[in-house]
Amino acid sequence: MRIDQNLAFMLQFENVAWFEDGQVKILDRRIYPREISYVVCQSYEEVIKAIQDMVTQSGGPYSAAGMGMVLACFEAQDLSKEEMISWMETAAKKIANARPTTSTRMKKIVDDAVAIMKESVWSTNKELLEIMQQYAIDEATARYSSVKEVGSRLADLIPKDGVVMTQCFADAVIGFIIERLKETGNTGVSFITPETRPFLQGARLTASVIQDMGFEVHVITDNMPAYIMKEKKVDVVTSAADMITMDGYVVNKVGTMSLALLANYYGIPYYCTGTPNLKHETIETVKIEERDPSEVMELLGTKVTMEGVKAYYPAFDITPPSLVSGVVTNKGVYSAFDLKSYFN
Amino acid sequence: MRIDQNLAFMLQFENVAWFEDGQVKILDRRIYPREISYVVCQSYEEVIKAIQDMVTQSGGPYSAAGMGMVLACFEAQDLSKEEMISWMETAAKKIANARPTTSTRMKKIVDDAVAIMKESVWSTNKELLEIMQQYAIDEATARYSSVKEVGSRLADLIPKDGVVMTQCFADAVIGFIIERLKETGNTGVSFITPETRPFLQGARLTASVIQDMGFEVHVITDNMPAYIMKEKKVDVVTSAADMITMDGYVVNKVGTMSLALLANYYGIPYYCTGTPNLKHETIETVKIEERDPSEVMELLGTKVTMEGVKAYYPAFDITPPSLVSGVVTNKGVYSAFDLKSYFN
């Protein structure tokens, strides 16, 4: 049984990024679920462009990288073995750098693909392609396995029939939380997802995954968490993290900090999911980038503000360890003040 | 000089609600500033419908009520004086009840219009219409005068070249804050307005008023205040109030409570503007209504969520007095714990 088998539609490997018949198709998360549409890539260069255009996000680009290497291999089928290895090394380098902020993790995935190719024995191109695709599936499976540990541990922190408020889109974590809730019979749990402007990852992605997997979910706008936490008796607030520094700061989608502060005010635990980052000893080394603010002044491409009005667009904010009730990892739940224990 | 003369376009009487040539035109605040368009009413019944359809909001319906009475008078011009008074009394009753939550204040405006008509002496219908329109203008002027006091006092709490974060749309308060800042030469002040989903009063109305009056304004989405308060060094957070109870709770557009909590966390004052409400001794007597949640799942009329996903839509939230740094009224600035002093 494949690890993604019981997850929501958009979390299944075929709908994240998938090589078949000489092309890679990637679910367009920019418009899902309003439209179920795939960007179809005929070359690994087109996969890079899709990643850069943010057709997929969160864990999606890692899957696209793996499948992009399969496609690169398909493109190289008329080359000699030596030429092919050189071609694949070039592809690996380019795919790894599709987006600067994720290049370290991407590099590992594509470099491993090249290594597998070098080590493997094959007699036909078809065999090689199968080896490469199996590698891409194994890599995605390994990522999901770790996420499944995280999701299960988080699920076990949710009280019977509890109400969970999520932030943005925690990708497969959400799927594995629900899978675990089903396993343990805690199926009365319900979810509340702030919409997460400007791209609405909460309203579109998180809510769809929960709905798809048969649990109740309510969307709210991003100014409603205070009222809703109190009046709807939220039991657990949770988010993933773009980065957890070793001194316990959570860098995540903008809005996380105020959810954590509100949770603290109302006496609700806020759990962050993810892995502490050894490369950032302290929050002082993290720079929050502000993006092109035009998205903030638009709704679905329509500008709503008067000419001359400006905007700010910080994509992330920083939650201090004092507002984090626990960091839920694949190895267990840690205090934000004791993250070195994760590596012991 | 008329009190609204130097205010932004949308705050000027002619663009709020205005009787002219046998009709009342009301600026459509639902689409402003994307489109500058007026709903034109040929009867006072159409004015009621416009109020119910929320063509205008905040202080707008009070102006529409006054001008609606002028239109009712125009409609009655062929009646005898006795019939006319009866017709006007009926109009007053109907207009006052256009929206249940504002009926007390509306009733005063329309009843006073009837009283003025009864007391006045006129020889032609044209004269009577002029008397009624002058009453409507005087009533709006009296409202603006009180708001001007509030705006001036708030403006005087803003440090030199300070950064002000507003919530939702405080109507003419914003205009009079800026008028006062100009008077006192504090023209380096800038503003930050969360967009205020689902209807975007912050992005569309507040930002437009500020921009129109020549001050710098940045829009943010409703999940960005935490990051922005800290990183852009906000000096003052302010909102109006739909209701201030005598025990110091602020009932206002949803999102206000988390702004107040964040301001408290970062050591920034949060000032609420308005008048304490003697009818509500404590917050216990206030019921927060939740509205039809479909708006939450839509952006400009396009549904973005998956079939089956639900939503909540509380229009207001409650900020406790411990998070309010001051209640700025037309008479002065009061502690939220000492609102009885306002009536001394």
Image (cartoon, coloured by chain):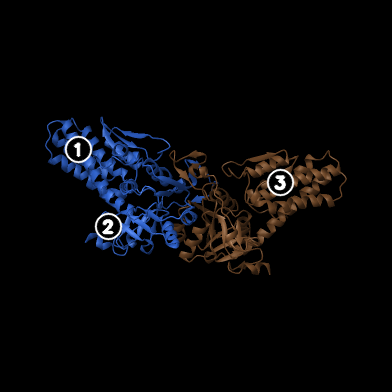
Chain colours: A brown, B blue
Q: Determine which of the numbered discs, if any, sits on residue B132 in the image.
A: 1
Q: Are marks 1 and 2 in contact (CB under 8 Å)?
A: no
Quadrant (top left, top right, bottom left, bottom right) of the N terminus of chain A: bottom right
- Marks 3 and 2, how far apart at CA: 63 Å
Q: Determine which of the numbered discs, if any, sits on residue B332 in the image.
A: 2
What residue is pinned by disc 3?
Answer: A95
Q: Tell if the residue under mark 1 belongs to the same chain as the one under mark 2.
A: yes
What's under tag 1, amino acid-wise?
Met
B264 on left or right of B284: right
Dot 1: chain letter: B
Quadrant (top left, top right, bottom left, bottom right) of the C terminus of chain A: bottom right
Q: Nearer the viewer, residue B319 or A215?
A: B319
**Mark 1 residue element:** helix
What's under tag 3, amino acid-wise?
Ile
The number of callouts visible is 3
B91 on left or right of A19: left
Q: Nearer the viewer, residue B108 or A333?
A: A333
Q: Are marks 3 and 2 in contact (CB under 8 Å)?
A: no
Q: First in sequence: mark 1 or mark 2? A: 1
B10 on left or right of A98: left
Using a 10 Å C-alpha cutoff, classify the residue at mark 1 as few (fewer than 14 neighbours), some (14 to 19) or many (20 or more). Answer: many
Residue B124 occupies quadrant: top left
- Marks 1 and 3, how far apart at CA: 73 Å
Q: Position of residue B20 (x, y in %)?
A: 26, 32
Whether residue A27 is visible, yes or no, is no
Q: Which residue sits at x=66%, y=52%?
A: A102
Q: Position of residue B55 (x, y in %)?
A: 36, 40
The residue sitting at the right extreme is: A123
Q: Position of residue A88 (x, y in %)?
A: 78, 45
Mark 1 or 3: the one toward you: 3
Q: Is residue B23 above or below residue A92?
A: above
